[in-house]
Amino acid sequence: MRTVLSSLASACAVIALAASYPALAATTPAPSPSPAAKAADAAPLPETIPSDLPRNARPTHYSIEVTPDAQALTFTGKVAIDLTVFTAAQGLTLHGSGLTVSSAKLVPQAGGAPVTLQVTPDADAQLLRFAAPATIAPGRYRLDIAYTGVIGTQPSGLFALDYPDKRTGKTVRGLFTQFEAPDARRFVPSFDEPSYKATFDLSAVVPASQMALSNMPIATTQPLGKDRKRVTFATTPRMSSYLLFFGLGDFERTAKKAADGVEVGIVAPTGSGNQAVFARDGLAEILPWFDDYFGVKFPLPKLDNIAAPGSSQFFGAMENWGAIMTFERILLLDPATTSPAGLQDIYSTQAHETAHQWFGDLVTMAWWDDIWLNEGFASWAADKITDHFHPEWNWKLGGVDGREAAMNLDALPTTHPVVQHIRTAAEMEQAFDSITYQKGQATIAMLEDYVGEDTWRSGIRRYMAAHPYANTQSKDLWSAIEGAGGKDVDLIAEAFTRTPGVPLLRVTAATCKSGQTRLLLAQDAFSLDPESRKGAKPTWPMPLLVRVGDQAPARHLMSGKTDTVTLPGCGPVLVNSGQLGYYRTLYDAASLNKLTTGFAALAPIDQYGLLRDNLSLSMSGYQDMAGGLNLLAAVPASADATLSGRVAAQWQGVYDLLDKGAAKDAFAARVSRTWAPRLQTLGFDPVKGEPLTDTKLRAQLVDTLGAVRDPQVGAEARRRLQGLATNPAALDGPLKRVWLEAAARQASRSDWDLIRTQAGKVTSIVERQLYYSALGLASDPALANETLALAISSTPDATSASQMITSVGRVHPELAFDFVRTHQDAVNKLVEHAGRPRFIARIVAASTDPAMVGKLQAYAATLPADEAKPVLQALTSLKQRLATRPAQRAQTAAWLARQPAR
Ligand SMILES: [Zn+2]
């Protein structure tokens, strides 16, 4: 799954669209289970793997038939589950949630009379308990269940998305599924845990005119009267239930054969035309690269990526095997709305989901405790392949942002280890956080760098070869990498995945003598909470890559609390060269001064890494703000485009820290003086043929200068917005979002009305969400209140509404929080069932109101312990902001006053 994190288009030639979905080619080989998988089927689930279910039975195959009633938002289902009962039992227990069972029958495979089972649902535990009239003897059975279920309007289970048809503007409805984690049980009674792998046959009775989609190609289509058909998909390989997919709607598909012979397709709402071409060609490029990297060819006959028109508050895409689902805004390239960052997201999100086709789908974690391995690995692999095919994007700099996002969570007392113990559904949902994704990714990147790229890849190939169609734990990967020759992998990996927190390395460099520099290193733990800085700290084995002056970097594994290292060379000392180490580095003042003075000579990745690290150390009180701000000021406005964009965003971040007043105004003026000339050089509009990175920098500068209220950018934004009154396409292009947001921040009543009217008119769901979200950015509290009221009215579509509230939270967190608490029932309908505490935590992320402490405490007290965690994290983070803001503000003002007048 790709979490929600944060566009350039040229006219493409019109392409031929296949209106239909692929039928199974006669030559498709049947996938065969590995010996490990066969062995798993023959025995009960081991006690070492957690489970909600009694271990007396195990499924091997599901035959499912569903008949959705899209208008009524219900469906009927029938399932026949082939299973083995291992020990005599009074009944069977399966997962099921929101399902009503009408009949259940157990059919012995060896012959004999079927037995009718009585079902008792346990809604809280999401279980269906089936009781038999007499003891069930061990053996092979088929469990036949008839049931009905509901179709939701938020992305979990089987759900509907309503959206305007691209040709007619008429509202139409598409159906999709989202089963991670754990919601297959809302679709079919099942053993809905990752270790219960089985094969799946899916068939669906659907309107004849619509396209039905699943993991596999269609095996047969049977007409049922004039208007309906039964579509049966080919049998899937052995896989986990959370990877099953079903989709239905008015879709079109564009496909091509990748170099490995696998058909890759992009499925999009009808009328999307060549918006799917960029993604299709990207997928055809990415898939064979992974065949080679993993050393196992993609085992399914086709790989689709399906564009879902809408959004989730919590995820962008899902790696269903052979049928990835991605929300449209990060899959289709629309010249009217896709930003340059959006275009890059399309590429990297596909790379992430494609990596999962092996890492997660072919080889799956045994239990959710190891979800980090799925997500950390897919995130790492996506960055690797994106950097490989697009070196001009300077993609590695994003790794620094990922590290910072992880550390912001990992340095709070509420942190958790990467490998964490997960039991409940709420804990599963919450596991998809920056520690799982970005710390996981950072740990993998650090390990690959430590053992070397070739050894790492050999280890991954051994791992894939050993466990296809089976389940693993983290240790299986470490032993495969060590088997390939990697040293200390288990030692480093265990420390970084089992011990929570962020290592802090204190570095003192002695004066250079006889051409050698001596470093004194001391380990500590970095914490955002001053109270937690006291007391004993863990020790991590830390792989360091140290560069002294212009010498080649030297590798060193620091294993104790303190260490002394002597290295050849004189000059600035950079301890985390390449920025792949997951730790903070606090230099002594003289060493930091040397690095600041010699900043221009560092590689962009080190410039950016050093800057972010020092800004964080400054903001958390480990050093004066000047430490970070001096580095910020050391990046010239003429720096590499990717670096410049990211640095401009950091200026904006510091601006956001400051209270209204003279220092904030002076800081804004400083940002304008630094960055407005670069924007002037680039021009306000994209230049034909310019590099994507220039278009992206322009967008970032409009955003930053708009945020700091640069008068020129503000006036231009308003001028462009007003163009909408006469020309609905006035804002179209790769900078649409940033111009709209710059205008929305300073919106007058009539500007706000104009945006609102436009939202009601457009026929693209992506564009409509852009307008609705922008409404929430108005700084006028009266307009913010109106946005909130509009969000819970019936006007916006179901998935835009929550984004409007989140937008208001960016500017008026207290207003948004109070509104949500007052209208909790109405808001609950707009947010995915398990994500409500996370949604609230996100809304208050920018709050610096002391009164919010009590409000969050009161809210947390209303939640069960396993759901309260995101709120408690938000609370700790708020307290930390309240404690550090006064010093940050005073030190920033003092730094500004010391700057030479220009
Ligand atoms: Zn993922």
Image (cartoon, grey):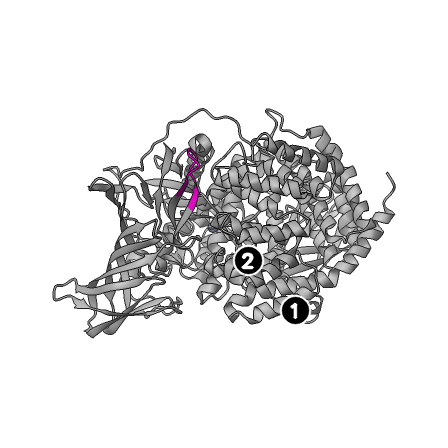
Q: Which of 273 and 499 is in front in this view?
A: 273
Tell me where the magenta segment starts and ends, as one range. Answer: 162-172
* Label 1 lies in ligand 1 vicinity (Cβ under 8 Å): no
Q: Nearer the viewer, residue 88 or 723?
A: 723
Q: Give the structural element (helix, strand or loop) at label 1.
A: helix
Q: Which of 568 and 39 is in front in this view?
A: 39
Location of residue 661 in the rendering, given as x and y in whole percent from the top left corner: 81, 51
The local crowd at label 1, few if under 14, some if 14 to 19, many if 20 or more residues have their Cα within 10 Å, is few
Kindly tell me whether residue 581 is visible in this rendering: no
Residue bearing mark 1: 854
Q: Residue at x 80, y 46 (%)?
A: 665
Q: Which residue is drawn at 68% across and 38% down?
A: 701
Q: In this view, does 267 lie above or below 438?
A: above
State the image quarter where residue 219 is shown: top left
Horizontally, residue 608 falls left or right of residue 61, namely: right
Please state which amino acid type lies under the numbered disc 2: Phe
Q: Give the label on residue 839, or none.
A: 2
Q: Is residue 422 above or below residue 617?
A: below
Location of residue 473 in the rendering, given as x and y in whole percent from the top left corner: 43, 60
Location of residue 72 in the rendering, given as x and y in whole percent from the top left corner: 34, 52
Looking at the figure, which quarter contains the C terminus?
top right
